[in-house]
Amino acid sequence: MGIKIDLPSLLTVLSLTANLFIGFLYRNEIPVSKDIGILLVSFGGLFFVYTLLYLRRGFFGGTEPELEFLITDGPYRFCRHPLYLSFIIMILGFDLAFRSVVGIIFTATVSMPALIYRATVEDRLLRKEFGREWDDYANRVGFLFLKLGRSHRDEKVT
């Protein structure tokens, strides 16, 4: 029996961990108050906990869906991947608190793409698992942010 490696999860954990070390080690004096970074870390942390209240045991899984139902309430009413949005907010907060330009660059070029890759893989797996229910949900709700405007399915045919 071989070990199955969840590559999107591994990339996400490695990139976020590396991001913290890089931000800490390569501090600069960018003209931003550390308090803004601390505020973002705090807000991202609270948003993370709020999301966990809805995800519960689904959080401890890999990229493959662990739950037998699709979560569409709480923070999932606003975006399909609020957990990853909370990670982005927190890591940017750490970069700003450390005043690390290198950390911000790493966030933009490595950590965010790793999170987006994992979320894209999850979207594909959730579509496979939940079919039409997922398609309807994905049409209503944005990927990482609020979906602005009306979707084509919401328009009335005259």
Image (cartoon, grey):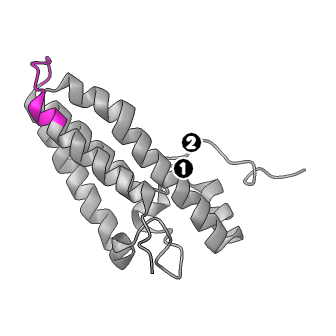
Depth check: 49 or 19 in front? 19
Between disc 1 and disc 2, the foreground one is 1
User: Which residue appears at 14% of the width and 18% of the height?
Assistant: 30
Q: Which residue is mark 2?
A: 148
User: What x and y, as percent, mark residue 157?
Assistant: 87, 52
* Type of amino acid at the residue the image marks with label 2: Leu
Task: Name the disc covering residue 50, or none.
Answer: none
**Residue 23 occupies quadrant:** top left
Nearest the viewer among 74 and 11 is 11
Q: Position of residue 51 (x, y in %)?
A: 33, 64
At x 49%, y 71%, the residue is 71
Q: Residues within 10 Å of mark 2 (few under 14, many from 20)?
A: few
Above or below 51: residue 56: below
The answer to whether any part of residue 36 appears in the image is: no
In the image, is residue 53 part of the stretch drawn in magenta? no
Going 41% across and 68% down the picture, which residue do you hit?
62
| Mark 2, secondary structure of its residue | loop
Q: Amino acid at mark 1?
A: Gly
Relative placement, left or right, of 70 versus 37 is right
1 or 2: tag closer to the N-terminus: 1
Q: Residue furthest right?
A: 158
Q: Which residues are magenta?
A: 22-32
Cα gap from disc 1 to disc 2, whole angstroms: 8 Å
Mark 1 neighbour class, 10 Å CA radius: few under 14, some 14 to 19, many 20 or more: some
| Magenta stretch: includes residue 27 | yes
- Image quadrant occupied by the N terminus: bottom left
81 lies left or right of 69:
left
Residue at which label 1 appears: 142
Residue 4 image offset from top left, x and y in percent: 44, 70
Instruction: Choose top left, top right, bottom left or bottom right for residue 102.
Output: top left
